[in-house]
């Protein structure tokens, strides 16, 4: 049975789609990985994979049954073991119906993939309501800002109360110079506030911005500050004991 990860956050724009796409790509070097976009109204997983308007079918077509899973499951170029099912750009089916369909799809495909990632919208909306399942793992993404950390903590609390206790914390856009000057919370403070186990730190990186705007993944850039951080999170998800990244 493949492991299922919801990629969630309290606050929006903290890097869920970035983490989801890049960690999935890193894992796909050795495992079969499926990524599903559950951010049904403001989806951009297709942009992260450089595939906006370059695929024909999406989740909604699959739901309507006018295409097969093979039609809707888009191979990510350059990553032979990585497949994505994107959300529609114009949703016609109620989000609740499509989210329940995402859950069915996960259950139906768990045997065929080693890892399934679900890119969620921010906060405690319908997606978390429907997709939260004690059998699934959660990657809770935050930036080192007090508002994002506080919202992440509250989202994690709700998930815990629903029996989802396999939650790991990803702190994205870390800027050590700000932490040194006490202009941003220290990583230990973030861990204490959220009471979550840390699985990775990702530095603020112009490479992420560049990749996101040029149809590229960070792992496909020749060089980038955050490349190793994504790869290390992928390794930790497989159970490998990898020391935490240190960057200045
Ligand atoms: N480590 C990083 N360094 C620099 N920029 C980053 C980093 N991580 C993410 N970003 C930028 O932050 C922006 C938001 O990222 P992303 O879309 O992944 O967030 P999100 O949590 O999925 O947002 P939403 O809540 O809208 O779904 C993007 O422009 C992305 O390039
Ligand atoms: Mg997103």
Image (tube, rainbow, N blue to C red):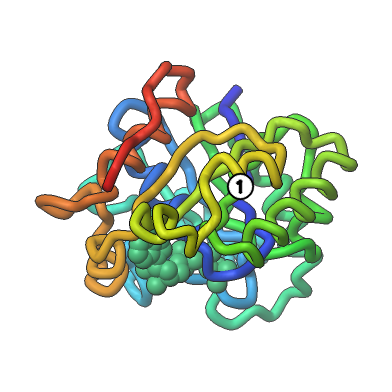
Specify whether residue 48 is in view: no
Q: In this view, does 175 lie to the left or right of 120?
A: left
Left or right, 78 with respect to 199, comes to left
Of residues 234 and 65, the one drawn nearer to the viewer in this rendering: 234
Residue lying furthest front: 181
Residue at screen point 55% across, 59% down: 37
Q: Which residue lies furthest to the right in this view?
A: 161
- Please give the name of the residue rendered at 79% of the width and 55% of the height, measured from the top-left corner: 154
Bin the neighbour count of mark 1 within 10 Å (Cα to Cα): few under 14, some 14-19, many 20 and up: many
Report if residue 53 is visible in the image.
Answer: yes
Mark 1, secondary structure of its residue: helix
Choose top left, top right, bottom left or bottom right for residue 247.
Answer: top left
Q: Point out residue 181 in the picture as x, y percentages from the top left corner.
A: 41, 59
**Residue bearing mark 1:** 190
Height in image: 99 above or below 79?
below
Q: Where is residue 87 in the image (x, y as percent from the top left)?
A: 56, 67
């Amino acid at each position: 049975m493949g492991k299922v990860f919801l990629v969630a956050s309290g606050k929006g724009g903290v890097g869920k789609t970035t983490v989801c796409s890049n960690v999935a790509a890193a894992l796909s070097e050795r495992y079969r990985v499926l990524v599903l976009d559950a951010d049904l109204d403001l989806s951009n997983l297709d942009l992260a994979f450089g595939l906006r308007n370059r695929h024909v079918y999406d989740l909604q077509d699959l739901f309507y049954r006018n295409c097969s899973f093979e039609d809707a499951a888009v191979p990510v170029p350059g990553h032979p073991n990585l497949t994505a099912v994107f959300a529609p750009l114009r949703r016609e089916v109620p989000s609740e119906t499509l989210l329940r369909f995402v859950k069915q799809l996960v259950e139906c495909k768990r045997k065929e993939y080693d890892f399934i990632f679900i890119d969620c919208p921010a906060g405690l909306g319908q997606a978390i309501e429907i997709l939260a399942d004690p059998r699934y793992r959660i990657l809770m993404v935050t930036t080192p800002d007090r508002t994002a950390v506080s919202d992440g903590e509250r989202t994690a609390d709700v998930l815990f109360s629903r029996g989802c206790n396999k939650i790991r914390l990803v702190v994205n856009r870390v800027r050590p110079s700000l932490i040194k000057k006490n202009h941003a919370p220290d990583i230990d403070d973030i861990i204490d506030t959220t009471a979550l186990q840390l699985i990775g730190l990702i530095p603020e990186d112009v490479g992420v911005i560049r990749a996101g705007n040029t149809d590229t993944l960070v792992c496909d850039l020749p060089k980038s500050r955050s490349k190793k951080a994504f790869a290390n999170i992928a390794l930790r998800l497989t159970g490998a004991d990898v020391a935490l990244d240190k960057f200045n």
